Image (cartoon, rainbow, N blue to C red):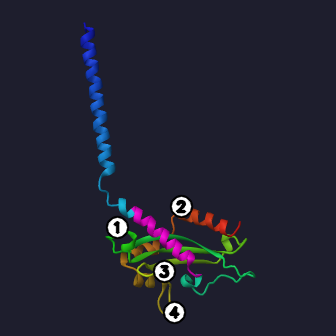
Amino acid sequence: MISRENFAGWYRNRFVWVAVIVLVASAGAVVLVNRADPEAKPADLQSQIIARMRTTLEQADPGQHNHAGHGAQQAASTAKPAVICGVRVYGYEPTEATVLADVRTVYGFHLCGVAEQKRPWDVAVKLAGPVIMDMSTEPPGIQVVEATAEVMFTDRVRQMLPPKYAELALKEALTESEMADQRRRYDAAADL
């Protein structure tokens, strides 16, 4: 038969072991969270680059990132319609940059809509495509990748973007969440 003292000693030891297991699991979790993850800093830098790209494109005259001669229709009023952009960053140079001030060139995609009052998204003037931004100037320089009379679009993308970004540019545009955010902001700017 087990005496009360033996049972209490065994029981206490069981709690000690549970405490040891919880402590080890907690320490492991802390190590995993604080581990030097190479994506940790770029994720913050990535969001800063996205914000800077979006702001630059939205403040620029649509002609600076105009495609194939498309332009906003001139409204009866003199107020300039808002340009609402969604962006996606494919990459930047130098790739080892850890702060926005060190980034010189950004390769990405932009989709902008000119938010004329009461004009729904489906019929809005849109400017879209791969873009290269020169972040070493103020304001950043915008270079849109588009076809020429002599060079097809896919070839032009491969000419202007580094190979690893060119392949992304030919396959990927905005993420679903970025597109949803852009549409929400467009509807607000167009007063819909």
Relative image position of residue 23 (x, y in whole percent): 29, 36
Magenta part mainly helix, strand or loop?
Answer: helix
Q: Earlier in the sequence, mark 3 or mark 4?
A: 3
| Residue 79 vs residue 3, the one in the foreground | 79
Estimate the spatial distance between the alpha carbons at disc 4 and disc 2, rounded to whole Å.
Answer: 35 Å
Q: Is residue 1 above or below residue 134?
A: above
Dot 4 or dot 1, earlier in sequence:
1
The residue beneath circle 3 is: 139
| Mark 4–mark 1 distance (CA, rounded to whole Å) | 39 Å
Q: Which residue is mark 2?
A: 177
Secondary structure of residue under mark 4:
loop
* Residue placed under numbered mark 1 in the picture: 98
Is residue 152 visible in this depiction of the protein? yes
Residue 132 versus residue 61: which sits nearer the camera? 61
Measure the C-alpha gap from mark 3 to mark 2: 27 Å
| Amino acid tagged 2 | Ser
